[in-house]
Each structure stands twice: as C-alpha cells, then as structure tokens.
Image (spheres, grey):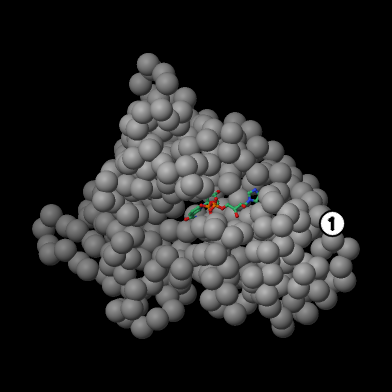
C-alpha cells in the first residue's frame, strides 16, 4: 500500500480503439491529474486493429493485446512492479459484464462505462462477483463529476430547498433524428438489441438523467410509468421517451430523454423543486447553478466563486470563469477512483466514492423497468431491482 502511494496507478483498457468515441475521452480524463498511466490494452475485437490502436498510443507491442482474455492472463503473470492495477471498460454494452467479471477473477479493479451491463440480471451477478473477488467497481456516470452538480446535491442535503416535491431531468439529443448512416458505428451498435440491450435512448442517455435525479436529490425512484417510442421507422429500440417516477419521499419525477430532437447536442438539464426553493442546472452551461424562490431574487451560484461545498471545491480545478467541462467531470471520477484504489480496502477519508455497483443495479433496473412499463397498460409499476 505504501508503495502504491508513491507511484502512478497503471491502467489497462478494453475497447477504445481506432475510430471509437468514449475510449479517448477516458484516456484524456485519466491523464488529467497525473495519477494514472495507460500501460496496456485490448482495444478492439479485431486483433490487428487492437495492436495498431495500442501502438498508435505508443504502448509497447507486447502490451497491445489481441483480446481481453489474453490481456488479463498476461497482466496477472507480470511482476507486481509493472502489472496493471485496474482496467477501464469502454466497449459496447453487451461485453461489459464478461470483461468486468474476467478482470476481477484475475485480481483487477474495474472502472466501467454505463450502462453497467447488458441486463439487470447481469448487474446483480456483478454484485456477487465483486463481493467474491473483493475488488473495486466504479461506474462512469460522468455528470456526477461536475462541481455544480455536487453543489446541487449539497444544497438539497443541507435543506436549502426544504422537502423535495418534484424533479425534472431531461437529456435530449438530435443525432439519431434520421436513419443512421450505416458507417456510423456508434449509432449502429446502439440501435442493435444484441449489443445495446433492451433500449437505445433510455439505456444510452435516459439512464444518466435518472442517475442524476437520484444523485442530486438523494431519493430513490420507487415506482414508474413509462412511454417509449421508436420515432424513426424501422427501429427495434426506442429513440425517444418519457418516464414518470415516484420517489421514496413521495416526490414526483420526470425523466425525459430523446435522440430525435433535431438541433439538440447534449441537452442534459435537471430541475429540483422543494417546498422552500428550486434549483436548476444545465450541462451545456456547467459553471452555473440557479437557486430560485417565489419571494426573493434568483441566486446564481458559480463554480469556484465564494464558499462552496467540500465536494464541489474538490471537483474544481480552474479559477472562476473557466468552464469546468465534460473532460474535467470525467477526470473527477478517475481521480476519485485512484483514491479509492490507494485506500483499498478502506474507503478514502473525506471523499465521496464514485458511482459503483449500487448505481449499476439501479441504472439497469431503470432501463428494464422503463421498457417493460412502456409495454404495459397498467399505469404504475414498482421499481424492481431484481
Ligand atoms: N459516460 C458517458 O458519458 C458515455 C458517453 C458515450 C458512451 N458511453 C458508453 O461507452 C461505451 C462505448 O461507447 P462508444 O460510443 O465509445 O462506442 P464505440 O463503438 O465508439 O467504441 C467501442 C469500442 O469497443 C471496441 N470493442 C468491441 N468489441 C470489443 C472486444 N471484444 N474487445 C475489445 N474491444 C472491443 C470497438 O472496437 C470500439 O473500439 C458504451 O457502453 C456507451 O454506453 C458513455
């Protein structure tokens, strides 16, 4: 443990090869705080592409693996002073569980992109794998990493809003408004139920909005009513939808997500209303959090200005007025995960852990419950996590 405190942590990666989207974002985020070095990877299902992708990142040829199975075996066999410490999983959804399980069976901690698994049953199985192998699992719900999201959570916790009565979380995009170009690999697998799972839009972005609803309010969804659609004809999976929710304190919630809202980029917003005040935050203007009242002027809280919460301050890198953006929010998850690994098996002191297996299960439950509720004529459905 002492040794680990004086060196960078060594990361391997599965997925994120040539032409991939989020793998590169993970690498930039992991690099930002100088706590992590990428030492190996199995970057593609195609062995040649996997090797090429690793070499383009200047990794030694013997650590650019043809498959993740090969990588875990070879890394486990290495000496402790060069072996990777953890793996980042950035493949399409259907592979997450198998990769995470194999990583843990070989002794590695895991940070994985959302949705955590392909099915809810797998997410529950993942919890058993984590418990059996006593490894850490982190889930990259990116938006929880923003300073103003952390501030929003703090405002709710310290009672600024009073009792929470209503929450509206929205994530609208427009990039799937037309039939996807068959060369767009990100669109192709997201619309394919054998790779994405039971949902496209709710699984891809609705799950972020639902996670934010629970993260900011500290209240869990207990019942839902859902209406999902495939607006573009010929699609098997949803590209648009709305979920009504009841929260465990009696508040009501709305999660609305769409990938067919032309002109929307990453229009993620959350508004939380309590009996005393309301708050709202937009990811496309991340440094601003609004606190609203009926009987006094709106308060504008800005990242890095004045006295902010401990977590918000920790999540801030630049002086006021410089946007703390997507990459920084992502990096906040990585830097916290390194603290969790360094402190393991204890929890790091004074630091909130990043989303983990509980959020993995709740995220998969949100997706599966939303799909089945949408197919039902019954209005309200219990939020089942098994
Ligand atoms: N947190 C976020 O904000 C966020 C944003 C985008 C995507 N994601 C998630 O990240 C994951 C990847 O999404 P993406 O858009 O980057 O997809 P992508 O298609 O761009 O990249 C997937 C990569 O996985 C590789 N891959 C496929 N099978 C593999 C295998 N057997 N072994 C090794 N590599 C393999 C592909 O070659 C590709 O390089 C998805 O689960 C997605 O939901 C999260």
- Locate the C terminus by quadrant: top right
Q: How many marks?
A: 1
For this rendering, which residue is in front, 279 or 294? 279
Q: Position of residue 280 (x, y in %)?
A: 27, 56
For this rendering, which residue is in front, 382 or 206? 206
Residue at which label 1 appears: 73
For this rendering, which residue is in front, 205 or 134? 205
Q: Secondary structure at mark 1?
A: helix
| Left or right of residue 286: residue 189 | right
For this rendering, which residue is in front, 314 or 257? 257
Q: Which residue is most to the top?
A: 377
Which residue is painted at 65% across and 37% down in the image? Answer: 122
Answer with the quarter of the image where residue 124 lies: top right
Up/down of 95 relative to 142, above or below? above
Which residue is painted at 32% across and 41% down in the image? Answer: 177
Which residue is painted at 78% across and 58% down in the image? Answer: 71
| Left or right of residue 96: residue 382 | left
Q: Residues within 10 Å of mark 1 (few under 14, many from 20)?
A: few
| Left or right of residue 204: residue 379 | left
């Amino acid at each position: 443990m002492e040794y680990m405190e004086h060196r960078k942590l060594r990361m391997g990666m599965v997925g994120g090869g040539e032409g991939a989207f989020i793998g590169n974002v993970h690498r930039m985020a992991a690099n930002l705080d100088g706590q992590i070095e990428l030492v190996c990877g199995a970057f593609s299902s195609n062995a040649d592409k996997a090797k090429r992708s690793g070499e383009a990142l200047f990794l030694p040829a013997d650590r650019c693996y043809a498959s993740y199975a090969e990588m875990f075996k070879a890394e486990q066999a290495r000496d402790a002073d060069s072996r990777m410490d953890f793996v980042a999983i950035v493949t399409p959804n259907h592979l997450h569980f198998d990769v995470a399980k194999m990583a843990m069976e070989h002794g590695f901690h895991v940070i994985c992109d959302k949705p955590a698994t392909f099915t809810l049953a797998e997410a529950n199985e993942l919890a058993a794998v984590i418990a059996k192998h006593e490894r850490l699992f982190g889930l990259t719900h990116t938006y929880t990493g923003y300073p103003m999201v952390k501030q929003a959570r703090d405002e709710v916790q310290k009672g600024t809003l009073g009792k929470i009565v209503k929450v509206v979380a929205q994530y609208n995009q427009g990039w799937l408004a037309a039939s996807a170009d068959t060369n767009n690999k990100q669109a192709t697998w997201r619309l394919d139920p054998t790779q994405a799972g039971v949902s496209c839009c709710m699984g891809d972005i609705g799950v972020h909005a639902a996670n934010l609803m629970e993260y900011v309010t500290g209240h869990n969804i207990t019942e839902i009513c859902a209406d999902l659609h495939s607006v573009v004809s010929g699609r098997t999976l949803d590209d648009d939808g709305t979920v009504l929710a009841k929260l465990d304190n009696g508040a009501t919630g709305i999660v609305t997500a769409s990938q067919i809202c032309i002109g929307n980029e990453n229009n993620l917003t959350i508004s939380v209303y309590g009996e005393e005040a309301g708050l709202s935050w937009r990811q496309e203007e991340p440094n601003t959090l609004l606190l609203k009242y009926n009987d006094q002027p709106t308060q504008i809280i800005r990242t890095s200005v004045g006295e902010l919460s401990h977590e918000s301050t920790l999540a801030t890198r630049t002086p006021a007025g410089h946007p703390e953006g997507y990459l920084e929010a992502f990096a906040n998850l990585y830097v916290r995960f390194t603290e969790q690994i360094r402190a393991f098996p204890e929890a790091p002191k004074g630091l909130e852990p990043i989303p983990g297996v509980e959020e993995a299960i709740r995220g998969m439950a949100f997706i599966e419950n939303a799909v089945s509720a949408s197919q039902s004529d019954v209005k309200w459905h219990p939020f089942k996590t098994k």
